[in-house]
Image (tube, rainbow, N blue to C red):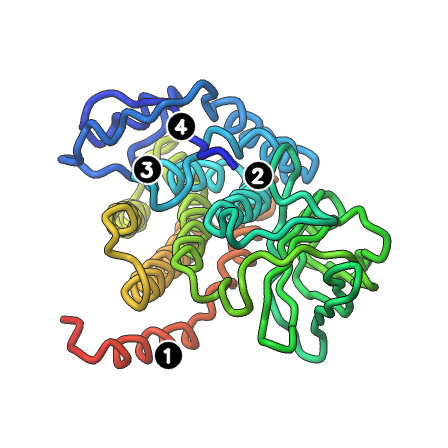
Amino acid sequence: MPDGTLPAGGGADAGALSGALDLDLPGALDLDLPGDDPTRREVPGEVEPNAQLRLAEGAAGSLAVAIEVARGSGGPVPLPGGGHTARRWEFLARLGAADLSVARVVEAHLDALAILAEAGADHAGSGAVDVSGGADTWGVFAAEGKGVSAHAARTADGWRLSGVKPWCSAASALDRALVTARTPSGSGLFAIDLHAEGVVVQRDTWFARGLVDVGSGPVELHDVPAVPVGEPGWYVQRDGMAWGGMGVAACWFGGAVGVARQLWQAADERAPDDIALMHLGAVDATLDLTRTRLAVAAAQVDAGAASGLAGRIVAQRVRGAVARCVDEVLLRAGHGLGPGPLALDDDHARRVADLQLYVRQHHAERDDVATGRLLLEAGRSPW
């Protein structure tokens, strides 16, 4: 699979990437830090993601638009860890600020392409499913649920998957998926064709008020042909697991920026009182701090400083920081704006509902426990 790229940006200032994308968006979404080596910005590429971002701005939660954006994003967006991770995460953040339904679908699609690229020719099998990426849209179905699981069996005709996978976002609209399943040697990752006989998307199971069109219900697998991607255990052990988790956090961050813009607009349209100014200032502080944390993490990924245990710790810190930023922005926007926009502004009400659901991929206090465990595993004081 070819390494996708974004167009080259100019200069080494923090706004250079915004200029390259020609979107005139606020600096909160610029993830390149001042002082970065400007030569690393010279990324070849013929296709700019402007069209995908503009589509997302008018998506209004549409799954059809999300699929269209995903289909056009695989080529121009760089893979993580190749020197331009900030560009990748900024694209995801901008999608999140525009429409979280689009960001949810596109992030998983890009993550699947990155996983296939990370697996490489030595790890991606061949057979019943095309694993080259191509123009297909992809999902990643790796969640586990109580009482449900998928199992892989090797037959004379190759691998077959059976069982149930929960939390399969947009399964009814995607072409392919990377699916985790239990094997005799441990958990394995497999590529499947979602149009294959034996794939049954359970409908009428998604009652969420957020991400309404991006149904994430269960998928039944009945003796479905599959191609192994990596050895058992490879999926969770690879460095890209942590990098992909931070890509999700970039989407959350973008959603927080989208909500914060409503707070700014309200203050800009009428003379704000001191309480409104307090909320605006506090939101700016948390967004700026979180933007910087994402930018530093992107630089760590590209510098090789976010691999192995160190990478897992970086990812836990980033996801926790972004989740706390989202919580604060939602709280302050609610206090500052009151019920009006939630009741009368369709875009704002949808964005808040989408973000509240999406950020719950972070496991709150349980993820703090996981971070503490990783810090002790590292064997030295982190401070």
The answer to whether residue 52 is seen in the rendering is yes
Label 1 element class = helix
The picture places residue 341, in percent across and down from the top left corner, at: 53, 43
Residue for point 73% across, 59% down? 206
Q: Which residue is mark 2?
A: 347
Q: Amino acid at mark 2?
A: Asp
Disc 1: CA contacts within 10 A as few (<14), some (14-19) or many (>=20): few
Q: Amino acid at mark 3?
A: His
Instruction: Estimate the x, y position of residue 160 in percent, counting from the top left.
Output: 76, 63
Residue position for label 4: 6
> Which amino acid type is shown beneath numbered disc 1?
Val
From the viewer's perspective, is 119 left or right of 311?
A: right
The image position of residue 322, as x and y in percent, is 36, 56
**Which of disc 1 and disc 4 is earlier in sequence?**
4
Query: Mark 4 or 2, which is nearer the eye?
Result: 4
Kindly indicate whether the residue at mark 4 contacts the one at mark 3 (C-beta within 8 angstroms).
yes
Residue marked by disc 3: 84
